[in-house]
Structure formats: C-alpha cells, structure tokens
Amino acid sequence: MDELVIKVPAPFSGIDDVGFSARYPAQESGEPLRDIPVFVEGPARPMRVLMERLLLFADRADMIDVGAADEAYCWTPPIQLSDEVCVLAFRDRSLIDPVTASLASRSYVWNLVRPLAFPFLRDCVRIGKLRLAERIAVVLDTGRPPVVDLELERRAITPVNGELLLFGS
C-alpha cells in the first residue's frame, strides 16, 4: 500500500476552521497495519474543548462495546503540540487476542479499507458527544493525480449526532 493522506477540513457543526488530516504510511501488503497519525488543527479556544473530548478516546473500550469486527481498533492518548494542534493515532487491534480467526480477518480488512475519517468522526459523536456538520468533505490524496474529493452526509457516517458545539464554550 502506498502512502495516503486523508484531509477533512471542517467536520464540526458551526465552525469552519477546525479540521484534521491522517497520514497512512506506506507498507507492504499483508503486514500488520501500522499506527495512523491524526493531526487536528484549529484555533486555540475550540481546540481546548476538542482536546478535552479527545482525551476520552484512549478509554473507548471502557465506554462502548468493542466486540464487533468494525471496532477492532483503539486510539492513543492525544498529545497537544501547541494551542492549535494536537496529534493522536489510530491503532489496529484486529490481530491482538482475536476471538476467532474469521473475526480477526474481517477486522483486519475492515481497518485496512475503511478510511480513518469514519471511525474518528463516529467516535467524536459516540465518545466525545461532539456535533458534526450535516455535510462533511473528505479528500483522499495519494500524492499523485487523481485526488479524490467526497462530500458525505453525516448520516452516512453516524445515524445520530452529538450535542456539544466546539465554539459554544
């Protein structure tokens, strides 16, 4: 797999200057998935609220049922690099203590083919209780043309939405 960058410029309701990007490192086919760093950027005030919510991500296994094939992942604790930038990582858990070989295979494939933007945004709602925008732009960039631009309705990512607004604090 070649390196891939996913950019999501304004996924949160009511605020256009907070977004994130994820960089999938290049790796050989069939090798365990590497951690995927997620960089979140925005103005200091909404980033303080977001950072508080992202700190909860490291405890997701205690907060939601993670037994399904599409839940075989975890998040590292976020690290605040500045008032306007933090980083955390998506970590594949499909090959660690698998219940069955078939579930491990499904989980591995799910984590390999699903863009990281989807579990990140879903967890922003489920764990962070954050309100997402109703339309979300996602850009997939492999470093050479064509760049893939998608615009999705929030319902395609999560059927429910959070209540916490980043600019309301």
Image: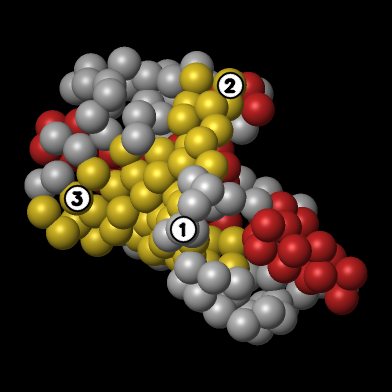
Amino acid type at image mark 2: Glu
Front residue of 135/125: it is 135
Counting residues from the start of the chain, the first of labels 3 and 2 encountered is 3
Q: Does residue 108 appear left or right of residue 73 in this picture?
A: right
Pair 1/3: label in front? 1
Pair 3/2: label in front? 2
The figure's colour scheme reads secondary structure
Q: Which residue is mark 1?
A: 144
Q: Alpha carbon of mark 2 to alpha carbon of mark 1: how far? A: 27 Å
Counting residues from the start of the chain, the first of labels 2 and 1 encountered is 1
Amino acid type at image mark 3: Val
Where residue 83 sits in the image (x, y, percent)? 10, 47
Which residue is drawn at the image coordinates 43% and 60% (left, top)? Answer: 143
Q: Is residue 54 visible?
A: no
Image quarter (top left, top right, bottom left or bottom right) of the C terminus: top left
Vertical order, 77 against 100 (above or below): above
Amino acid type at image mark 1: Arg
Q: Is residue 38 visible?
A: yes
Q: Which residue is mark 3?
A: 85
Vertical order, 39 against 16 (above or below): below
How many marks do you count on the picture?
3
Mark 2 lies on a secondary structure that is strand
Which residue is drawn at the image coordinates 60% and 72% (left, top)? Answer: 1
Q: Which residue is mark 2?
A: 153
Vertical order, 158 against 113 (above or below): above
Mark 1 lies on a secondary structure that is loop
Q: Does residue 109 appear left or right of residue 24 in this picture?
A: right
Crowd class of label 2 (few under 14; some 14 to 19; many from 20; radius 10 Å): few
